[in-house]
Amino acid sequence: MRRSFRNVAILVSALGIGSFVSLASADPKTEAEAKKLQSAAMDEDFLMLELKGAQKKLDEAIKKCGGGKCSEAIVAGLQRDLGIVLINAKKTKEGQKAFEAAFAADASVTIGKDYLANADVAKAWEAAKKTAGASAPAPTPSPTPTVTATATAPKPPAGGSAEGNLEVKAKLAPVSYPLPVIIDLPEGLDVDTIKLSYKTAAMEKFKTLDAKKDSGKYVVTIGCEDTQFVGEIKYYVRAYDADKNEVEHLGTLKKPAVIKLVDKMPDDVEAPSYPGDREPEKCVEKGDCQPGFPCDKSASKKPQGSGCESDDECDAGLSCVENENGKKWCYEAGAPGGTKTPSGGGKKLWLGLDIQQDFLFISGSENICKESTWACTKQVEGKQTDIGVSDDKGIQVAEGGGGKTSGGPALATTRVFIGGDYFVTPSITVGARVGYAFRGGNPTENAKFLPFHAEARLQYFFGQPKTSGARPFAMLSGGLAEFDALVPNIVAVPNSGARADDPAACAAATTPEEQGRACRITGIDAYRLAGQSFIAPGGGVWIHLGPSFALNVAGKILLPLPTFSPGLALEVGGKFGL
């Protein structure tokens, strides 16, 4: 009997020690960082349909929690939220795997009912539950109050048509006052944090605020900047436990609750107040111009998400940019996730179709058809023939008789491109282009022209992101390409009179003057060869004609290598934002 008790004691001690080790491995600092990322992903990015940003934050939080640095419940909540984001981004298989990982971490993990309004999310959640063999509880049921002798059933929700069991009594509020919103919880519900998201008609997106405890009540204050005008404030509320699991809500993004702002409150309705019947102080009127209130220009700037017409209306660090729906709003250039700050006010990847005309600056030179940096050709008896090489491949020219040019600018190749530019920051793009060149060098066997073009480029844009108007940029590009310039009507002297334009006249000539006129080849096309690689600094401008289209006009200095002949390239084309 003593041995049995001893064995039981050892087993209990082992289990206790194991539990302690498991709990001890969790790092409070890491858990706090993970919860912060989770909150930003689901309460901000996801609700604004910034799915890439939400996924990035959740992936980062899951990575931080690796090696047992977070509790099983927190890891399960992160995986669950990642699954929700992925499925809403049409990555259903990846989302279901995330749900399976959530059940593997904690079989008791739950999901909010409003997320299951998405049929794909609901289907994947049930499939993951079956795969994991988990007996997961039903999605976020209404909390059951603790049954005691004095317990009473929770009051019905007071959110109008909004769904949920949290309660907000305020339905009307006066304009020009801060609006205290008191959130009452059902009896027995244990929460860690509560968040309220709201927007007015002037705001492009919802703003999220954390509720604070005031005299035992959860309170959110909507400030004077958003209560100045008659209209509706739409809002929804979410309550979370310590593991960031949503345990209750009021309203949703699609079906929010409403508080109406009115000029005058009805006689039988009290204005919202703080706990203890503390009334909010009236906002200073715009005409009063006291510091810190809307009349003061430094305080009247609009917050992120507010509608605007110009940058001057927005808070410091914000710009008035046009979103994908054509509406202007205040938005932070360089905000986390970066998905709404590139040059198109929401577009990071831009595909382009461009045409480029090249010019080369040619120095004066003699005997050019004998030089390796030139290729000379002419139609002879209906056949394109090389000039200046051996007789078995063309017409050989006499020593010193290879023709000459006085130099100057010359029209060179024309090329077309397709390519793409990606905004790695609101001001910097990296990109690549491929293309094909026309009007190139010798079409015969001598110095065959390379028509293909491959280019990498780096661009720096000046000023704020735009969806209309001009935005200049500087660039540096380089790659593989050949740039040939045609110099027509070159005259050369063949090494044999039989290869002259008029062999009979050449044979009949007796004086040097006569031979000079008769023993020659005229009408030669000489191509100055440059490349077949290059470096090209330059600059230009994107003229934005809408959120998804810009006209590109640019110029660059051509520095062909290793066959060097400096030049200039002018390009024009269209850019299409995705």
Image (cartoon, rainbow, N blue to C red):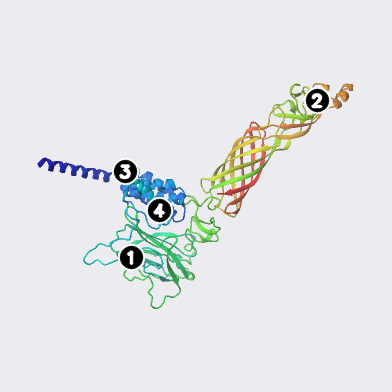
Determine the image quadrant of residue 137: bottom left
Q: Nearer the viewer, mark 2 or mark 4?
A: 4
Residue 40 visible in the snapshot: no
Circles 2 and 3, Cβ within 8 Å, touching? The answer is no
Q: Nearer the viewer, mark 1 or mark 2?
A: 1
* Amino acid residing under circle 3: Gly
Give the residue pinned by disc 3: 68
Q: Position of residue 423 (x, y in %)?
A: 53, 46
Give the residue pinned by disc 1: 184
- Whichever of callouts 1 and 4 sits on the residue coming sooner in the sequence is 4
Q: Position of residue 561 (x, y in %)?
A: 63, 32
- Whichever of callouts 1 and 3 sits on the residue coming sooner in the sequence is 3
Determine the image quadrant of residue 507: top right
Determine the image quadrant of residue 170: bottom left
In-image side of 108 versus 514 (left or right): left
In-image side of 102 versus 496 (left or right): left
Q: Which mark is residue 493?
A: 2
* Amino acid residing under circle 2: Val
Within-10-Å neighbours for mark 1: few <14, some 14–19, many 20+? some
Q: Position of residue 558 (x, y in %)?
A: 64, 37
